[in-house]
Amino acid sequence: MINEWRGGNKFLLLENGEEYFPRVLQAIKEAKSEVLLETFILFDDKVGRALRSALIDARSRGVEIDMTVDGYGSDELSQEFIAGLTDSGVRFHIFDPRPRLLGIRTNLFRRMHRKIVAVDGARAFIGGINFSADHLPDFGPEAKQDYSVEIEGPLAEDIMEFTREALAEPNAATGRRKRLKPRKQATPVGDGYARLVIRDNAKHRDDIEHSYRASIRLAQSDIIIANAYFFPGYRLLRDLAGAARRGVRVRLILQGQPDMLIARYAASMLYQYLVDAGVCVYEYCERPLHGKVACIDGAWSTIGSSNLDPLSLALNLEANVFIQDSKFTAALHRTLEDLLSKYCRAVPVTAHAGGGLRRLWVGVVVFHFLRRFPVWAGSLPAHKPQLQSIVAPEPESHACPDQRNFP
């Protein structure tokens, strides 16, 4: 299932919330048996309320529903908002809920950063878009630029099975998660190949990074990557530089209007090295870039939740799909080319006349600190992240949330 190539799929690129949210709500409206949903952020705004209403309606038709949110990204949800879901029978789960300390969130690392919607094992959505109004254009200049993909076919069943098993307790004897329902034989609906690749803190720590690096090393003519938070490790940087030096056209689209200034500063430390190797680095300046996508050679693409930074590559729970489908890749490539031509600028990298040695050593120290700090900090907590499951109480009873270790 994980990392297995599956054929017979059909893909639809969805750009920003105005394309993504209506397709998700329609899929939930048409659900017949089961909806599984994971999101880093769920806000009590017009987007979150529309999603809640759709889930409650589906539950009233007898559809089984599990929703998981991250305890850091969605910690401001009210009890009233959650109760509206659980009272209807939706099973609501919070990944690693922890109280604030002096108003500061303490669950900073090992976040559940995936964005997945799986419906009936026949349709799935995966990408970088959260359920919040800041993914819509009427949010204003701070509205995010982002992408998701709608999947039909056998891979949609793989994604549903993975999401379902993420809710199951480990089997005590084998350590493996128990399958809740028998796997169906999915019907092919197209001719696209794809695989689900995840990052966790157990057996799949480096899978997404390895998949990126393997594809970059095999590239023959063209690489274009758009990534919101770009601060990868040395090996991925070396692979990008190596591809450019052997004649591959390598283009990076990074944040020019970042929602966090530290993200832009960290990425800018890498510009000179990349440009010297022949990589073309651009900053997207229209609004905050939140996408995590790439295209290689017009035949391969990826889309998902994983940034190319220490949090995503070393700590967070992430999920990407890697796709071999020329039609989908062409659609994504056209979108990124349009972004480049209309809204991006080449980074102004220049040689510095003085203080070169000092600047070099400062850069080395800062680079190592930023690259390694999340890993160091993430090793400090003694607890394992937990999954808190909230269900409606039985009549005349006082049920407590179920605390379970989340592998």
Image (cartoon, rainbow, N blue to C red):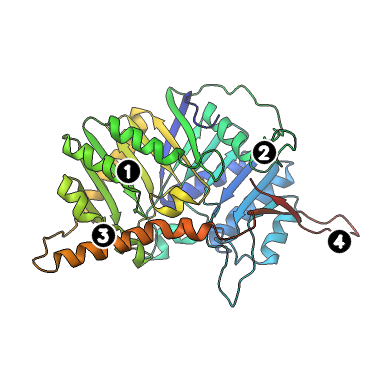
Residue 226 screen position, x and y as percent: 32, 48
Other residues around mark 3 within 10 Å, as few (<14) / some (14–19) / many (≥20): some
Q: Nearer the viewer, residue 80 or 267?
A: 267
The residue beneath circle 4 is 398
Give the Cα separation between the discs numbered 1 and 4: 52 Å
What's under tag 2, amino acid-wise?
Answer: Glu
What's under tag 4, amino acid-wise?
Answer: His
Say the numbered circle drawn on residue 236.
1
Query: Would residue 211 appear left or right of 44 to someone viewing this image?
Result: left
Residue placed furthest toward the bottom: 102
Q: Nearer the viewer, residue 272 or 279?
A: 272
Q: Nearer the viewer, mark 2 or mark 3?
A: 3
| Tag 1–tag 3 contact (CB < 8 Å) | no
Residue 366 screen position, x and y as percent: 32, 63
Q: Secondary structure at mark 2?
A: strand
Give the Cα separation between the discs numbered 2 and 1: 39 Å
Q: Is residue 191 above or below residue 399?
A: above
The residue beneath circle 2 is 34
Q: Is residue 362 above or below residue 250?
A: below
The residue beneath circle 3 is 268
Residue placed furthest toward the right: 396
What's under tag 1, amino acid-wise?
Answer: Leu
Of mark 2 and mark 1, the one earlier in the sequence is 2
Other residues around mark 2 within 10 Å, as few (<14) / some (14–19) / many (≥20): some
Q: Is residue 76 above or below residue 382?
A: below
What's under tag 3, amino acid-wise?
Answer: Ser
